[in-house]
Image (cartoon, grey):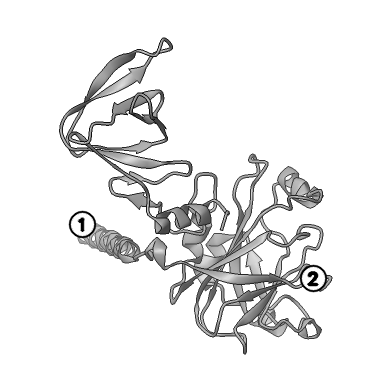
Amino acid sequence: MKKVFSICMKTSSLLFFMLFCQNGLNSVEAATTLPDNHTIEQLEVKWLNDGKSGHSIDVGNRKGTLLIRIDQPKVERNVEWVNWAITNVKAVGFQMYPTLDTSKHVGSSAFGFTGYPDGYAIDEGYPDKWAKEDGRLKFGLIKFSDFRDPNYYAGLAIYLDKPYSNDGKYWFGGMTYALKEPGQIKAYFFPNQDLVLDAYDRTKTGGTFPLMNKVMWGKTELWKGQLGKVTIKKPVTLWKRLDNGKLEKVRDLNQGDEFRVYRYLGEEELYGVGSGMYVKNIPSEIIYETPSKKNLRLIRIMNGEE
């Protein structure tokens, strides 16, 4: 009986310890704070026309997370991109070096990009001794947004734990069949944080890459194509515009509610809030606002337009 009791106590202690550790891990993860979207920096990217699809990315002499968005070529045929979608690849061989001097690009790419986040979570991108012997300095992650989307893109992220380049400029390229035109690559930077796994998670249809959060404007998320928003000052009516032009009441809106505005019917003074619904432009009952230039910039970045 004593032996059974002892086994039960040990088992209970082990379970308690495991639960304690798991809770501890969860609390650490929850405590991790993501940067404000407005702290993202857009970096200068130059097409080098060096025969290797090389680009210069000016990071500067600092540490932080480098984020690279690669879009498909717009002019030449993107055969390689079509093949990637068909084969559903995890990663491809883009290269990155801490010098623009291509004569020093020997051995494996100094910085590599893998498509396996579980491995990154274990070693945090640091190469093993064999990779070091082959010239590797650091690993990052690569992910394709969604092969079902004909305009899918590649999102890459790497944490530079220290300045590796003497002049702050990094060479990025390779995959000459995929990188054919200037403007395909855009680069961004969040200083002093390893956000590689966060960036990987946000590379998808409806994702926010290279941003770490949605672009919030008050209570609502700012969307591409949105003209502004209305905030309800006092209870008003939400209207539906019928085919004959008449308005039909849908429901009452409450004070403090916010709605995105996508169009404005000037003659009728109606703000279109989506799905054929409208709010009347009565200044004593609503407030209409337009998004700030800073937030519009973030939307352009999130959609690969800047």
Left or right of residue 90, residue 213 in this image: left
Q: Locate the C terminus and report the quarter of the image it occupies.
A: bottom right
For image coordinates 60% across by 56% down, the residue present is 143
* Residue at the spot of label 2: 49
Residue 134: where, in percent of width, then height? Answer: 73, 81
At label 2, the amino acid type is Asn
Q: Residue at x 23, y 61 (%)?
A: 9
Q: Quadrant of residue 156?
A: bottom right
Above or below — where is 10 with respect to 123? above
Residue type highlighted by circle 1: Met
As drawn, which residue projects farthest toward the top? 244
Verify CB contact (< 8 Å) between mark 1 and mark 2: no
Quarter of the view holding residue 231: top left
- For this rendering, which residue is in front, 163 or 297? 297
The tag earlier along the polypeptide, 1 or 2, is 1
- Nearest the eye: 166 or 240: 240
The quadrant holding residue 260 is: top left
Disc 2, SS: loop
- Horizontal side of 154 relative to 264 (left or right) equals right
- In front of the other: 135 or 20: 135
Horizontal and vertical percent position of residue 18: 32, 62
Residue 25 in percent (x, y) is at 34, 64
Q: Residues within 10 Å of mark 2 (few under 14, many from 20)?
A: few
- In the rendered image, which residue does mark 1 sit on? 1
Check disc 1 and report its element: helix, strand or loop: loop
